[in-house]
Image (cartoon, helix red, strand yellow):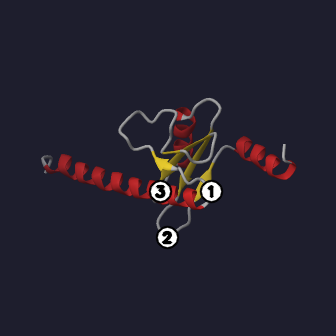
Amino acid sequence: MDLLLPHRMAVMGITERRKGADAEREVVTIFKSHGWPQARRTSDGHDQHGRGDIIDGPAGCHIEIKRQERLNVPAALRQAIADADRYDIPIVIHRPSRHGWMATLELDELLALLQLREHGT
């Protein structure tokens, strides 16, 4: 039975990678339809540090995409914060099955964005 375990793990890894790539493509399509026509995935095999899962989307944002049924949101946000450039806003865009996309960011970042929207400064 131990001999089958690595194979099962490899198959699960492929499935999870495909699910993640599909999620990234879905979010890229959403960005493109909302004014970021150059948005694209960063899946080129290079280090993701400072780049996130999507580039050429909203300026100044480090975006991580998660498509999981039971996401550990604090851990995902910690990853985005750790990987983001110093001045980028780390954002985790996520959704489970049969649910719309959600975005998680630190409250301080949200408050700054809301102030910009309301006061224009």
Q: Hey, what amino acid is under mark 3?
A: Arg
The residue singled out by tag 2 in the image is 98
- Circle 3 Cα neighbour tier, 10 Å, few/some/many (<14 / 14–19 / ≥20): few
**Percent coordinates x, y for residue 34 in the rendering:** 62, 59
Percent x, y of residue 22:
40, 58
Q: Would you say 108 lies left or right of 100 here?
A: right
Q: Earlier in the sequence, mark 1 or mark 3?
A: 1
Q: Nearer the viewer, mark 1 or mark 2?
A: 1
SS of the residue under disc 2: loop
Closest to the observer, 55 or 114: 55
Residue lying furthest top: 86
Residue 2 placement, left or right of 77: left
The residue that mark 1 highlights is: 35
Q: Secondary structure at mark 1?
A: loop
Query: Whole-Å distance between the Cαs marked 1 and 3?
Result: 30 Å
* Residue lying at 55% horizontally and 52% vertically, measured from the top left: 93
First reached walking from the N terminus: tag 1 or tag 2: 1
Q: Nearer the viewer, residue 1 or 58?
A: 58
Quick check: can you spot residue 113? yes
Work out whether residue 68 can be spotted: no
Disc 1 to disc 2, C-alpha distance? 25 Å
Q: What residue sits right under mark 3 in the picture?
A: 70
List the single residue furthest toward the front.
Answer: 37
Relative to 81, is 25 on the left or the right?
Answer: left
